[in-house]
Amino acid sequence: MRWKSGFAFALMLGGACPAVAQEAPKTLDQLAPEIDALFSKYQTDQHIPGMVYGVVRDGKLAYVRGVGVQTIDDKRPVTPDTLFRIASMTKAFTALSILKLRDDGKLRLDDLAEDYIPEMKGWTYPTKDSPRIRIRDLLQHVGGFVTDDPWGDRQQVLPQDAFTKMIAAGVPFSRVPQSQHEYSNFGYALLGRIVSKASGMAYTDYVKQTILIPLGMTSSGYDAPRAPKARTALGYRWENERWIAEPEMIDGAFNSMGGLQVSANDYAKWVAFLLAAWPARDDPDTGPVKRSTVREVAQGLNFVSVANRIGASGATACKQAAAYGMGWRVAQDCDLGLTLAHGGGYPGYGSHVMLMPDRGVGVFALANRTYAGPSAPAWDTAVAMDRAGLLDVRAVPVSTAVAAMFDAARAAYAAGHLGPLEGRLAMNFLLDRSAANWAAEFARLKGEVGACPAAEPLAPTGAMSTSFRLDCEKGKLDGLLLLAPTTPASIQALRLRVVPPEKP
């Protein structure tokens, strides 16, 4: 059996997530034609001049392909070294820069933004009891600003002094800060100001020195019009059944929300670095930002939504629980586990990235047509990899305590009473269900499935809990074992249920 993320919690609720049907295992090379077909169809349907897409797996760019052209006029083909603007996927670099400054003691996430941007101090908030905006509010889009796509995308060229005047003039609020998520490019432009103030250098210089250079992203940068023309994908929009060139935008005050330009070869280094933060471990921490800090971006704020998965499987897959972390949309997916994703929409460009940290896999795509973010083929690629058996779950190790308590729980089932668990039960266990009722429950289950001489490998959800499956004489039992926060270890909950027979 292939255990899915979140199984234990579904079990406690009396149900389980539907699983993606598995095919015979394939290699990534064998799956490549299917991946190519997904992106080729998207390119055609969306009238995209050129696109590059890649799969990062096990710390390297495992598959990459460029299709179409960089420019309409001279038909230069897209390659993995072609440069694309990634628009709002820049926000992840800004968020990690803020967290790095926090790590270095240059700021705190609960600091008021106005302590770094004094022009904000004169703002009129929507109510008398409105909280003043913190740095973390800007990171997670709860500053109370109005959603500003597409207005914000055209502010890329705004000079810094003009942005200062804009801030000083005040901003109309959409809602009270900290009350609801609402996506704001303006908020991330403010974060660029904070990075500059806290670091003592230009925002672009800080990102370059702290992230781009250490990761070897030597082709990436913010001054796109000065990039090598022979490698630059010019941006187009599709209008009146033809491509029209979008104006090239210089680096300006809104660069921190969407100004970065990368190649696929460079961007894969960023994706590999992020994925390497999982799982937590004792290895030396050699990255430009701590692994624990990278994992922190996945902490979604508690404005959780329920959404369909992106792509063709979205209508039939179980719903995602999604929130906004720090520069990332974070979701738990029944099949793919923890996912971090973000799109990028910009005049002339569209992009998407999705990471599956528990699998060590990321998929990204960059395109040169306005707002043509290739999210659907990126997610469909992930689902195809899952069906092909290419998303190996990074197993949670079975702790000594869980293993010992599981053996004792199996012995109790075999004995038909709680005797083998004597001295191993938390104080709540017999208060929640008497020993006599446990004996009756064991007898009932044995009447249905008989003895259970074998067990499948444990599927721990942490060092203090595990899902399990017992193979019995007349069927199977699914279970959950949950330990209490006590020393020595003790069992606070044991759940057992008969697995319904599979339908023909």
Image (tube, rainbow, N blue to C red):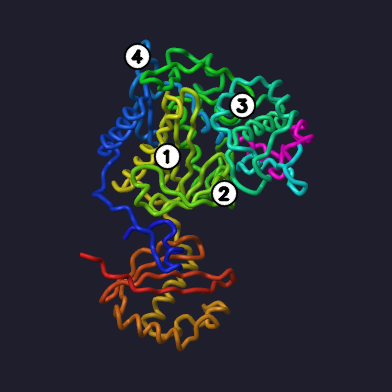
Q: Which of the 4 quarters of the picture holds residue 33? A: top left
Of callouts 2 and 4, which one flags the residue occurring earlier in the amino acid sequence? 4
Instruction: Residue 299: give its label.
Output: 2
Residue shown at the point (26%, 76%) measured from the top left? 473
Task: Tell me the crowding category of disc 3: few under 14, some 14 to 19, or many 20 or more residues within 10 angstroms, Cα based.
Answer: many
Three-letter residue code for mark 2: Gln
Amino acid type of the residue tagged 4 in the rendering = Lys
Q: Residue 75 got which mark?
A: 4
Q: What stretch of residues is rendered in magenta?
A: 94-123
Local SS, label 4:
loop
User: What residue does disc 1 label?
Assistant: 362
Q: Is residue 363 magenta?
A: no
Residue 294, horizontal then vertical, whole percent: 56, 42
Front residue (pair 112, 347): 347
> Who comes first in sequence, dot 1 or dot 2?
2
Amino acid at circle 1: Gly
Q: Is residue 322 above or below residue 230?
A: below
The answer to if 122 sits in the magenta stretch is yes
For marks 1 and 2, give the CA distance.
18 Å
Q: Residue furthest left?
A: 504
Q: Quadrant of residue 209?
A: top right
